[in-house]
Amino acid sequence: MISNLTKANLYLKFFGVTKIPLLWFCRPKIISITNESVEIKIPFKRRTRNHLNSMYFGALSVGADITGGFLAMTCIQNSNRNISLIFKDFKANFLKRAEGDVHFKCAQGEDIVKLVQRTIESGERENMIVHIDAIVPSISDDKVAEFDLTLSLKERI
């Protein structure tokens, strides 16, 4: 039997290869996932670092995007509805240089479930700010970046 974590990682790889190749290029991995939270790692490798030997801000943005969207994608799949997901805006605060594997965490699963329900009930586009923290656990538990993305959902008819 395949664990839920393994299934989620296989889905993430498949989604990256077939829909958004840049996601696949950064090689994200889901570290943990529950109904309430998700933690995703972007490895610090040649393809994700910049000329100053820290993680490139584009790779950090990819990590925030995946982390903010994965819980919503899971909720949408569980609803069995045809709901489109997009990020309406993106705000980042880079606090320190990320000089190792970066872990991105979002703990708004319950709020995202409510957003999906509001989207279904209203039939209109619904928005919510999703907060993601990024840390480099091999160095410290201090945040290296904070992200606020506006998740925007609309049911397609």
Image: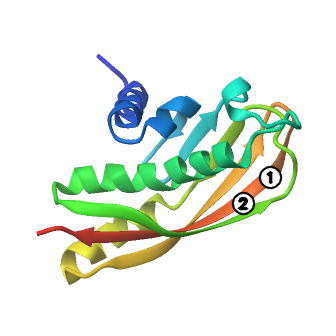
Tell whether 146 sits left or right of 19. Answer: right
Q: Residues within 10 Å of mark 2 (few under 14, many from 20)?
A: some
The residue shown at (71%, 38%) is 102
Q: Which label number is shown at residue 6?
A: none
What is the x, y in percent for residue 109? 45, 58
The residue shown at (35%, 28%) is 7
Q: Which of 126 and 108 is in front in this view?
A: 126
Tell whether 133 sits left or right of 119. Answer: right
C-alpha distance separating marks 1 and 2: 7 Å
Kindly state the secondary structure of the residue where label 1 is placed. Answer: strand
Most extreme residue toward the top is 1
**Residue 21 lies in quadrant:** top left
Residue 66 to residue 119: above or below: above
What residue type is disc 2 on?
A: Glu
Q: Nearer the viewer, residue 80 or 89?
A: 89
Q: Residues within 10 Å of mark 1 (few under 14, many from 20)?
A: some
- Report the quarter where the C terminus lies: bottom left
* Residue hosting label 2: 146
Tell me if label 1 and label 2 are in contact, CB under 8 Å.
Answer: yes
What residue type is disc 1 on?
A: Lys
